[in-house]
Image (cartoon, helix red, strand yellow):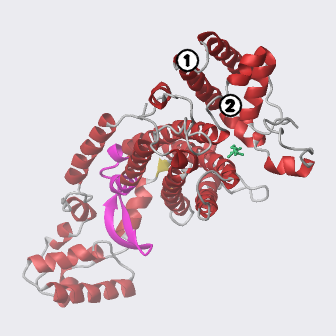
Amino acid sequence: MAQLWGGRFTKETDKLVYNFNASISFDQKFYKQDIEGSKAHVAMLGRQNILTKEEAEQILEALDGILEDVESGKLAITEEYEDIHSFVEAVLISRIGDAGKKLHTGRSRNDQVALDMRLYTREEIKAADALLQKLLQTILEIMKSHTETIMPGFTHLQKAQPITLAHHMGAYFEMFKRDRQRMSDIYQRMNYCPLGSGALAGTTYPLDREDTAKTLGFYGPMLNSMDGVSDRDYLIEFLSALSVVMMHLSRFSEEVIIWNSNEYGFVEIDDAYSTGSSIMPQKKNPDIAELVRGKTGRVYGALLSLLTTMKGIPLAYNKDMQEDKELTFDAIDTAKGCLALFDGMLATMKFNKDAMRKSASLGFTNATDAADYLVNHGVPFRDAHGVIGRIVLFCVEKGVAIDDMRLEEMKEFSDVFEEDIYDAISMETCVNKRLTVGAPGKEAMESVILEEENYLRKNPVMS
Ligand code: ARG
């Protein structure tokens, strides 16, 4: 047990209490950020003459040494320390003695941990953004190749109207584009520096908070020291944005699972992204899509946990906040893993155009267009709807599609029908006549693809 406090205690900490309280098993994840923050703090203490130049330099050099040794594996982070902050400080003191004891001047672990977590999360927001960008590129490639690949569009999981694969993919493009926008919004709000907030009330040393904020790449210092040590809003926002990402991935996964089923056969997941059964030799299962769908619950859970943890906490720092770490780390790693895996699965997936087209032509997906044909020949829409409804019933009974009917048969339902009805309700016409912005018609789709390409060009990953 090695801890940074003890002066006012007359007894050793109970072993169970020590373990319950300790966070090093998980906060060692941000050793790099802890050292980076300490370096900015010490350099500033030197510039402000709070420490001598020599002391500051000695500490900075030793901190670099510690970082190097941890990275090379020479120095192991051991769990005999309470947290990563204690570990770094203890090693520093063991290496340079008294000067090391000055590292913590004008600082508390409260603003230190607030800083470390913010520095860590900031990089993870960028990493999530980069993975989303990569997924968008994969989706766009599919869109470009499939503006003429006709498939059924669904409502209530019932065939509704024909669309194209490009159009279907385009819906996900928009979702993940908004996810990227959320990442950048969060970044804009969270990129302010808590260092210098002290335990809660700032410090009496003449710290230059603008200086440390700038050194660490923040837009500026946080403007209230109580908020500085106790704000976890940005984590809640990030977990919320990751939950939305997971919700999108989960919907997409659900579709891949359905499309990959024997009944649909719209897609085939690559062997490298499928798994087999230990008993049924014929099986090729969509486990990756199922796991992504399943892991969504974990990320939602993290969001709900943190919201619940924060709801009753009075200002300013309280130890409850230590709970932010494990669940945030887990949610970040889970979401990043899912984004990467899903992207790989999508990029290697084969689309079975014939099965999609056949499915589109066999579900009365052109019924709306047949009604529109009558409307265009002067029949009021409500009447046209009734006529086509009766035709569909007729076709269901005979087991045929509308296009399979002879013109004379159609004329029995309405004498407005002429030979051009067949062209009016072909799958190609149904799709390509839909040319309003955002619709599946080839020309409409091509201009959207251009816009999405522009978006990707103008919005490189956050650096
Ligand atoms: N491990 C603590 C956390 O994660 C660090 C801050 C400790 N501060 C304190 N006053 N005990 O929140």
Q: Amino acid at mark 2?
A: Tyr
Q: Would residue 73 be visible to someone looking at this image?
A: no
Residue 31: give its label: 2
Q: Residue furthest front?
A: 204
Going 73% across and 42% down the picture, which residue do you hit?
A: 26
Q: How far from the left and from the top, in percent, is residue 239?
A: 54, 53
Q: Secondary structure beneath disc 1?
A: loop
49 vs 396: above or below: above
Task: Work out how far the residue at label 2 is from the one at label 1, CA to CA, in angstroms.
Answer: 27 Å
| Range covered by the magenta-colored residues | 143-172
Membership of 153 in magenta stretch: yes
Please indicate whether residue 147 sits to the left or right of residue 21 in the image. left
Residue 49: give its label: 1
Considering the image in quadrants, where does the N terminus appear? top right
67 vs 429: above or below: above
Going 56% across and 62% down the picture, which residue do you hit?
A: 261
Please indicate whether residue 228 sits to the left or right of residue 452 in the image. right
Q: Nearer the viewer, residue 391 or 380?
A: 380
The part of the image, by quadrant, that contains residue 407 is bottom left
Q: How far from the left and from the top, in percent, is residue 254?
A: 53, 62
